[in-house]
Structures are given as structure tokens and as C-alpha cells.
Image (cartoon, rainbow, N blue to C red):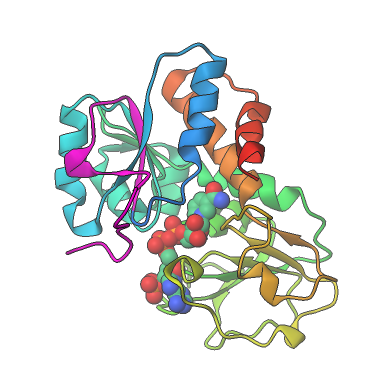
Amino acid sequence: MPSKHRKMHNPNYFSWKEAPSGNYAVIGDPISHSLSPDMFDAAFKHHHLDLTYHRILVQEDEFDEALNHLSSIGYHGLNVTLPLKSLAYEWVNTREPDAESSKSVNCIQLDIRAGNNTDISGIKYLINSAKISGKKILILGNGGAAKATVCALQEEYEIAIWARTPNNDYISSGNICYLDQLDLTGFDAIIHATSAYRAGESLAFNSSQLKDSAVLFDLDYSKDRQTPFLSQFPESHAKYDGSKMLVKQGALAFKWWTQLNLDEKVMEAAISKWT
Ligand code: NDP
């Protein structure tokens, strides 16, 4: 199936069939927005590693074929972004505990077919950087990032999930419920974890339902930290985009792959050049 997001001119990524041989890459669909190459190139340079990192477009229905191909042309590690994290979970043979608990894999070691999820630590880092006045959190979405968010926060917060396509993954857990309607009333924090705005769509909600003290998070990120989702709310609310999460999950993936510690400021600096 052709990608909905394929760029026609000057793409800053490779389709998997045309990818050059290399060491590391981020895969997804869409993929042109990913800042991972900037972060990893900075990390490799910092450690004097002569390694390459590319953006590679992989469509859902070609996932297995693409991974076998990338493995065969020398890739060692892949970061996995939307909408491929569940497929990555199925593809790997061994999983780190955070990948198992979230049923979502955001980085892979291809040669040993192992999967990890560093989004969970990234989300904790993002949420802990803010001051939330209570325990009631609403998560919007039900994909890989939303699942990682539930895993990251369920011990400390009461969680409600609103999703366009609800499922019963978490229904048995005592402090997690699903909302039938997208209603923001009473929550201390809202965490946006859908891909709607990336696809040029938007969510319909009534922002006046929000508590004055409510904090807004968007796992998506943008140059000015004002994502389309966050801009729908008044400036009086504390708002955080997903940049801090991006850096944390990237630094942890780097460590998992290379066994080298990385000062996160190296990746932060790469992102700030972009801003
Ligand atoms: P997935 O493709 O796994 O999930 C996407 C989710 O968005 C699904 O629940 C999907 O619902 C929902 N969705 C898509 N369009 C709409 C719509 N119009 N209305 C309502 N729901 C919609 O993506 P991820 O979970 O991996 O990523 C989600 C977001 O999180 C992305 O913006 C991504 O960039 C961001 N992210 C940021 C990270 C960071 O480091 N800062 C790391 C990981 C993700 P349905 O099942 O019905 O299609």
C-alpha cells in the first residue's frame, strides 16, 4: 500500500528498499519529521564513533520484509516510531521488561532480534519535570505511546483513557478506566498521545471543561514547543511538548545499543540547534 505520507521532492529519508547500508536508523511512517538522526549523529560524534544513522520509511504491511532487508545490509539497531511499535513487539524474539509490560517496542537490536521500550522512562522524565496538583490523569490515544504512558504512570496516578478505538487492554486494572466521550472535566493533567495532528487531523473537545490548574502534555513535539494540540488551550495553563521525552528515550537507546553512557545534554543541544 502506498504511504499516505510519502514526500514527492527532496525527501530527507530513504524508503527501505533504497536505503544504503548503514549502522543505525529510525523507521516509521511518516518519518521525515524525526529528529533522531540529529540526536544520534551528535552522540556518535561526542564519543568519536564512526557510525551512520538514517531516517527510513517503512510501511506497516512491509514491516517483516523491511527488517529482514535492513538486517541483511548491516544495520545493527533501529529506533521504531509510529505506527510500527506493536509490530516491532511481535517481531522481536526477546524483550526487555519495559517492552514486555507495555507490549510496545521502540528500539531493536536487529542481529539478536531483541526489543526494548525506552519511551516509558522518557515519559516519567517528562511528567516529573512538571508540577501536577493532583492524581487524576487523562490519556488521549491508545497506540504505542499511550500504552507506554499507562505503564509509566499507573502506579502513581488514577488514569482515564479516551481513545477513538478503545480496547480492553487495561480494563481489569483498578485505577484505570476508559471514557466514552472526550470530556476534560476534573483532570489534573491531560496527556495527548495520538497521531491525529501528524496526519493533518484534530481532536474535538471543549477546552473550557479544563480545570484552571490542569497541566497539558503533548508527546508530540515542535520547534517552538507549541504543538497544534497545545495551541488549542489558553496560555494560562502549563504546557509541555514531548522534547524532553524524545531526548531521554534516545539517550537510553544509545546506551542500550553501545553500552556507553551519554550526557543527555549532547542530544539536548542537537535538538536546540533545530529550535
Ligand atoms: P500509534 O500509531 O501507535 O498510535 C496512534 C494513536 O493515535 C492511536 O490510538 C490512534 O487511534 C490515534 N489516532 C490517530 N488519529 C486519530 C484521530 N484523528 N482521532 C483520534 N485518535 C487518533 O502512534 P504512537 O503511539 O507511537 O505515537 C503517538 C504520538 O506520540 C505521535 O505524535 C508521536 O510523535 C508521539 N511520540 C513522541 C515520542 C517522544 O519521544 N516525544 C515517542 C513516541 C511517540 P486508532 O487506533 O483509532 O487509529
90 left or right of 181 in image: left
| Magenta region includes residue 19 | yes
Q: Is residue 143 visible?
A: no
Q: Is residue 198 visible?
A: yes
Q: Quadrant of residue 95?
A: top left
Q: Quadrant of residue 22?
A: top left
Q: Quadrant of residue 237?
A: bottom right
In the picture, the quarter occupied by the N terminus is bottom left
Q: Main secondary structure of the magenta part?
A: loop
Provide residue 146's location: percent of width, then percent of height: 51, 61
Q: Residue at x 26, y 50 (%)?
A: 58
Provide residue 268's location: percent of width, then percent of height: 65, 35
| Magenta region includes residue 188 | no
The range drawn in magenta is 1-28
Q: Residue furthest front?
A: 9
Provide residue 227's location: percent of width, then percent of height: 62, 63
Q: Residue at x 37, y 56 (%)?
A: 30
Q: Residue at x 81, y 79 (%)?
A: 211
Q: Residue at x 63, y 48 (%)?
A: 243
85 left or right of 187 in image: left
- Does residue 16 lie above or below 194 as drawn? above
Provide residue 31's location: percent of width, then percent of height: 38, 51
